[in-house]
Amino acid sequence: MSYKGRFQVWRGDADGGELAYYEVEVNDGEVVLDVLHRLQATQAPDLAVRWNCKAGKCGSCSAEINGRPRLLCMTRMSVLNPEEVVIVTPMRTFPVIRDLVTDVSFNYEKAREIPSFTPPADLEPGEYRMAQEDVSRSQEFRKCIECFLCQDTCHVVRDHDDHKQSYAGPRFLMRIAELEMHPLDVADRVPAAQDEHGLGLCNITKCCTDVCPEGIKITDNALIPMKERVADRKYDPLVWLGRTITRRRG
Ligand code: SF4
Ligand code: F3S
Ligand code: FES
């Protein structure tokens, strides 16, 4: 079965733009990206849309559909009401380059600020040993496809551009948590998470978890455990005493 879908697609660039109305054929089994490709082929050859895999694995086709951050290639037309106009807009948190394509370099800058995996100096590659439980725990975070939908939806930067300097966002706070939980990582990640990467600004609204196409439990499994580590460090009297003694001995 096919029908004539009604769409409003944001067209413009860094200087401004507006929603453009299109009617495009929609067929059974199609995803939003299929329809945008048909739109390019038939009516708007200059429509800019970023994509690579069309399989939910490259994280390139992130945009907003009816205001919700989603992958264009993994959103089936069948989940949208055919009676209603479908509104497709670029990710709101990042600057627009053109049409549906945004400049996501904010995320690469944040990635660069996090020191990489730091194993003990006396271990050679090949000597790393860790329990399966620890491997499984970080495995969940490794499923991240870096679509940045969680970064787009988190209100800390979505509604407050001025927080971008001091806030790494859920994807990169999760990266810090992954390294902090790694039994062979010897770097102390807790103070920087709070002081440099803005963990305290996250008020666990879980919107990041809700939009993650990989189903990663970002809030429950990464952000809350990190917050607990910060609180333990700050308020647990035994931890405080232990640190003080160690410092004095050092
Ligand atoms: Fe995308 Fe999920 Fe990774 Fe965030 S954590 S960048 S939503 S895959
Ligand atoms: Fe933002 Fe997720 Fe925290 S949406 S506020 S990082 S729980
Ligand atoms: Fe790769 Fe959508 S095109 S995730």
Image (tube, grey):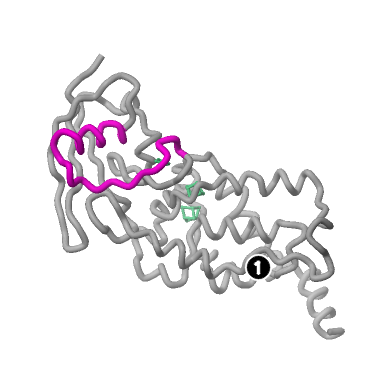
**Quadrant occupied by the N terminus:** top left
Q: Does 37 lie within the magenta span? A: yes
Residue beneath label 1, please? 190
- Residue drawn where x is 50% and y is 56% of the image: 170
Q: Nearer the viewer, residue 240 or 47?
A: 47
Counting from the top left corner in percent of width and height, residue 142 is at: 60, 48
Counting from the top left corner in percent of width and height, residue 182 is at: 72, 57
Callout count: 1
Q: Nearer the viewer, residue 90 or 58?
A: 58
Q: Does 15 lie within the magenta span? A: no
Counting from the top left corner in percent of width and height, residue 74 is at: 40, 34
Q: Quadrant of residue 69?
A: top left
Relative vertical location of residue 19 with respect to residue 6 in this rendering, above or below: below
Amino acid found under the numbered disc labelled 1: Val
Q: Quadrant of residue 25?
A: top left
Q: For the magenta stretch, what is the residue range?
A: 32-56
Q: Is residue 98 left or right of residue 219?
A: left
**Residue positioned most to the right:** 249
**Quadrant occupied by the C terminus:** bottom right
- Residue drawn where x is 45% and y is 38% of the image: 56
Relative vertical location of residue 248 with respect to residue 153 in this rendering, above or below: below
Q: Is residue 117 left or right of residue 28?
A: right
Q: Quadrant of residue 102?
A: bottom left
